[in-house]
Image (cartoon, helix red, strand yellow):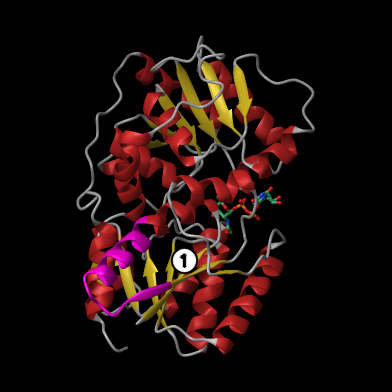
């Protein structure tokens, strides 16, 4: 059985690494299972892509579609054309897609039209905010999927509500957390750690990349000023996504305690999360990592597709009205942030469960 494993953008790489490892292990155990790693090239540079392959021991892609950046439609269509060409040369039995980026949706559409079964890892997440391209990617992918691998019972319920058959839904846990547990013993301090006088819990970590937060100069400026003010005496370490950096280049001044650094490789980034007092972010995936690490997380969004990070974990949804942040920071500085727990099945074994199921599907 041949499985195409699709990876396109930064948040995909930590999700596919443990799945590939589990497929290799299954093969060693004598199962007829192999993979073809397809990198769409949605993210392509050293900091957004290559460093993750190196640090997470992901093998060199068998195929790189090399699509690069572009508008939503340009990028999506380039991935579709590239993947269709590949399938016309050789079809796998299963196309496995992860998450919610353009590559996920584009490859799922092509695979389904070519008669290839689709497995979606992290299926069923819903923010119910149709302004997010990721929500559209999730909805489209989940209408085409044959096997749904979910990270929570809520995701399973979302799928049931939309009419998916119960027997197609497999609650397996979270592959991103597999990677987190696998690498906790290998974390590295970033090169600027000592020079910036950083120590455990003496800084905040900030990440921003959503178009709604970073594409309008005034809004980004407001967020940076308010977060830096709310941080009081602490430094705010800000690894900048290329999209955000593009906008920052127009700024004449930045708050004094804001430390702008490059996008970090995986081991350095998790090191920064684990040692921070708190994380302020507009990412979805990071709220899962902070939940498992027990680090307070303040999310600058109005909705989340990962509600368990709030009901069970350490995350709070602050919203996009930045002035409403103050009470959350008061709670943080008083040491009264909720402790949180680790959600069910976020135990480092999700990828094993996925591959166990896939290998059982046999001749599909
Ligand atoms: C994409 C995903 C988003 C994910 C994010 C993580 C979609 C719709 N969005 O958004 O879900 O959370 O990745 O990073 O799929 N760029 C580089 N180098 C790269 C990649 C991109 O400089 O390796 C630049 C591009 O030129 C572009 C900007 O970053 O200006 C945005 O890249 P793009 O892939 O279009 O979207 P993201 O905002 O990264």
**Magenta portion: prevailing SS class:** helix
Q: Quadrant of the N terminus?
A: bottom left
Q: Nearer the viewer, residue 13 or 238?
A: 13
Q: Does residue 342 appear to the left or right of 38 in the view shown?
A: left
Q: Position of residue 21 (x, y in %)?
A: 34, 60
For label 1, the residue is 138
Q: Residue at x 37, y 20 (%)?
A: 332
Q: Does residue 106 appear to the left or right of 78 in the view shown?
A: left
Disc 1 beta carbon < 8 A from ligand 1? Answer: no
Determine the residue located farthest toward the top in the rendered image.
233
Q: Nearer the viewer, residue 171 or 213?
A: 171
Q: Is residue 28 magenta?
A: yes
Q: Position of residue 315 (x, y in %)?
A: 36, 37
Counting other residues with Cα less than 10 Å from the Cα at mark 1, is it few (<14), some (14-19), or many (20 or more)?
many
Q: Residue at x 51, y 67 (%)?
A: 104
Q: Quadrant of the C terminus?
A: bottom left
What are the residue bounds of the magenta stretch?
Answer: 18-35
Image-quadrant location for residue 127? bottom left
In the displayed structure, would residue 332 be above or below residue 29?
A: above
Q: Residue at x 63, y 26 (%)?
A: 260
- For label 1, the SS is helix
């Amino acid at each position: 059985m041949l499985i195409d494993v699709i990876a396109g953008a930064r948040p995909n790489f930590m999700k596919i690494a443990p799945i590939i490892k589990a497929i290799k292990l299954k093969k060693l155990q004598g199962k007829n299972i192999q993979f073809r790693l397809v990198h769409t090239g949605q993210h392509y540079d050293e900091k957004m892509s290559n460093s993750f392959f190196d640090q997470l021991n992901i093998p060199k892609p068998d195929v790189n579609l090399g699509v690069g950046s572009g508008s939503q439609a340009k990028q999506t269509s380039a991935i579709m054309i590239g993947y269709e060409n590949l399938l016309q040369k050789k079809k796998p039995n299963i196309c496995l897609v992860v998450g919610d980026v353009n590559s996920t949706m584009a490859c799922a559409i092509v695979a389904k039209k070519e008669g290839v079964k689709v497995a979606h890892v992290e299926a069923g997440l819903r923010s119910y905010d149709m302004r997010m391209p990721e929500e559209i990617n999730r909805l489209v992918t989940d209408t085409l999927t044959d096997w749904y691998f979910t990270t929570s019972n809520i995701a399973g319920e979302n799928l049931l509500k939309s009419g998916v058959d119960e027997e197609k839904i497999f609650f397996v846990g979270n592959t991103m957390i597999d990677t987190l547990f696998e690498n906790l013993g290998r974390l590295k301090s970033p090169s600027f750690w000592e020079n910036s006088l950083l120590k455990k819990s003496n800084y905040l970590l900030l990440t921003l990349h959503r178009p709604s937060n970073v594409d309008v100069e005034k809004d980004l400026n407001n967020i940076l000023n308010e977060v830096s003010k709310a941080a009081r005496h602490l430094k705010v370490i800000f690894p900048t996504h290329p999209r955000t950096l593009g906008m920052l280049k127009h700024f004449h001044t930045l708050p004094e305690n804001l430390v702008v650094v490059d996008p970090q490789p995986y081991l350095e980034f998790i090191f920064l999360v684990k040692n921070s007092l708190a994380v302020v972010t507009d990412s979805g995936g990071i709220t899962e990592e902070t939940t498992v690490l027990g680090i307070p997380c303040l999310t600058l969004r109005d909705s989340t597709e990962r509600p368990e990070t709030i009901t069970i974990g350490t995350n709070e949804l602050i919203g996009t009205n930045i002035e409403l942040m103050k009470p959350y920071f008061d709670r943080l500085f008083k040491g009264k942030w909720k402790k949180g727990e680790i959600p069910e099945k976020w135990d480092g074994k999700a990828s094993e469960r996925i591959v166990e199921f896939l290998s059982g599907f046999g001749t599909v």
